[in-house]
Image (cartoon, rainbow, N blue to C red):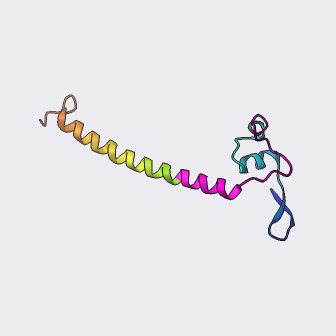
Amino acid sequence: MKIIGKTEDGFIIQAESNELANMVGYHSEYYARDTKSPLEVGRIYPISALYKQATETIEAYKEIREQFTKVSNSLSKLLAQISPAPGDKSK
């Protein structure tokens, strides 16, 4: 992406098709072509909202992964108390 100009409240950019497709949430320009919302001149893309949604999704994933690890560890401890591993002579 290259900034090629400035407007009163923003910029004019030059971007390759794949770059633009990625910025608006598509995997590639091919996915963008095959949807009901293809890349078009004049279309307004809510980049800030997409970015916010992506960062919130990443944070939620981190939280879910952390909680999953805690639950998994607790479950492992509980199962170890109920049924020791084969060959465990401590019980």
**Which quarter of the figure is the C terminus placed in?**
top left
Q: Quadrant of residue 56?
A: bottom right
| Residue at figure coordinates x 47%, y 51% from the top left | 62
Residue at far bottom of view: 8
* Residue depicted at x 19% and y 29%: 87
Looking at the picture, tell me which residue is in the foreground, 69 or 41: 41
Tell which of 86 and 59 is nearer to you. Answer: 59
Side of 49 relative to 4 (left or right): left
Residue 4 coordinates in the image, percent (x, y): 87, 62
Q: Quadrant of residue 8?
A: bottom right
Task: Tell me the quarter of the picture where residue 90 sits.
Answer: top left
Q: Is residue 69 left or right of residue 43?
A: left
Residue 46: image location, x then y, percent: 71, 55
Q: Quadrant of the N terminus?
A: bottom right
Q: Position of residue 85 (x, y in %)?
A: 22, 32
Whether residue 91 is in magenta: the answer is no
Q: Magenta segment: does it hold 51?
A: yes
Q: Number of callouts in the render?
A: 0
Q: Which residues are magenta?
A: 32-58
Rendered residue at 18%/38% (across/down): 81
74 w.r.t. 87: above or below: below
> Most extreme residue toward the top, as rendered?
86
Q: For the point 51% across and 54% down, which residue is it? A: 59
